[in-house]
Image (cartoon, rainbow, N blue to C red):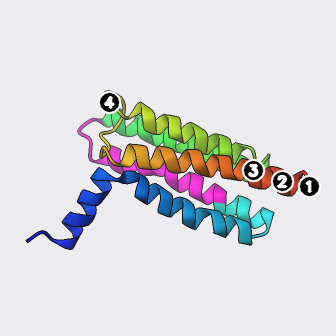
C-alpha cells in the first residue's frame, strides 16, 4: 500500500505545474489585498526565501565548492530583495526572473547543486509568473494605470 506522502511526492514528480499554480494562486491575492508598500516587503521576503532554497540542496552535496557557490548566489538574491525595498520595486520582479534562469541552469545537473527534477519547472514557472504579476501590479499602482 502506497503511503500518502509517497503519492503526493509522485504527483509532484509527474505534475509540478500544479504546485506552481497553487503557489501563484496564493501569491496573487495576498499582493492585491495589501497596500503597495507592504506588498513590496512581502515580495522581498519571498524573493529572499526563494533565493535561499538552493542552500538546502547544496548542503546535501558532497562539494564545498557547490555549497559556497549556491550560498553566494543566494546572498545576491537576498541583496536584490533588499534593493527592492530600499531602492526600487523593479529589483523584485527582476530578481524573480533571474531566479527562474537560475532554476533552468540546474536542469541538466551539470551546474550547481542537485535539485529534484520536479522542483526546477515548478520554481521557474512560479518565479516567472510572480515576476510578471509584480510588474503589472506595481506598474499599475505606482503609475496610476
x then y, percent, for residue 50 = 50, 52
2 and 66: which is toward the camera: 2
* 45 within the magenta span: yes
**Label at residue 136:** 3
Q: Earlier in the sequence, mark 4 or mark 1?
A: 4
Q: Earlier in the sequence, mark 3 or mark 1?
A: 3
Q: Secondary structure at mark 1?
A: loop
Disc 3 from disc 4: Cα separation: 32 Å
Is the N terminus in the top left, top right, bottom left or bottom right quadrant? bottom left
Q: Tell me the residue that label 1 is attached to.
A: 144
Is mark 1 in CB contact (under 8 Å) with mark 2? yes
Q: Secondary structure at mark 3?
A: helix
79 and 19: which is toward the camera: 19
Q: Tell me the residue that label 2 is attached to.
A: 140
Q: Nearer the viewer, mark 4 or mark 2?
A: 2
Q: Tell me the residue that label 4 is attached to.
A: 108
Q: Earlier in the sequence, mark 3 or mark 4?
A: 4
Circle 3 packing at 10 Å, graded few (<14), some (14-19), many (20+), is: few
Circle 4 packing at 10 Å, graded few (<14), some (14-19), many (20+), is: few
Amino acid at each position: 500500500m502506497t503511503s500518502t506522502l509517497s503519492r503526493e511526492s509522485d504527483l509532484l514528480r509527474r505534475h509540478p505545474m500544479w504546485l506552481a499554480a497553487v503557489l501563484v494562486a496564493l501569491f496573487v491575492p495576498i499582493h492585491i489585498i495589501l497596500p503597495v508598500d507592504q506588498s513590496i516587503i512581502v515580495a522581498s521576503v519571498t524573493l529572499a526565501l526563494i533565493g535561499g532554497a538552493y542552500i538546502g540542496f547544496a548542503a546535501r552535496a558532497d562539494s564545498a565548492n557547490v555549497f559556497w557557490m549556491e550560498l553566494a548566489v543566494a546572498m545576491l538574491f537576498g541583496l536584490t530583495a533588499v534593493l527592492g525595498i530600499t531602492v526600487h520595486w523593479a529589483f523584485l520582479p527582476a530578481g524573480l526572473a533571474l531566479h527562474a534562469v537560475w532554476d533552468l541552469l540546474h536542469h541538466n545537473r551539470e551546474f550547481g547543486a542537485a535539485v529534484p527534477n520536479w522542483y526546477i519547472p515548478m520554481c521557474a514557472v512560479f518565479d516567472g509568473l510572480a515576476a510578471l504579476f509584480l510588474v503589472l501590479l506595481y506598474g499599475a499602482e505606482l503609475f496610476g494605470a
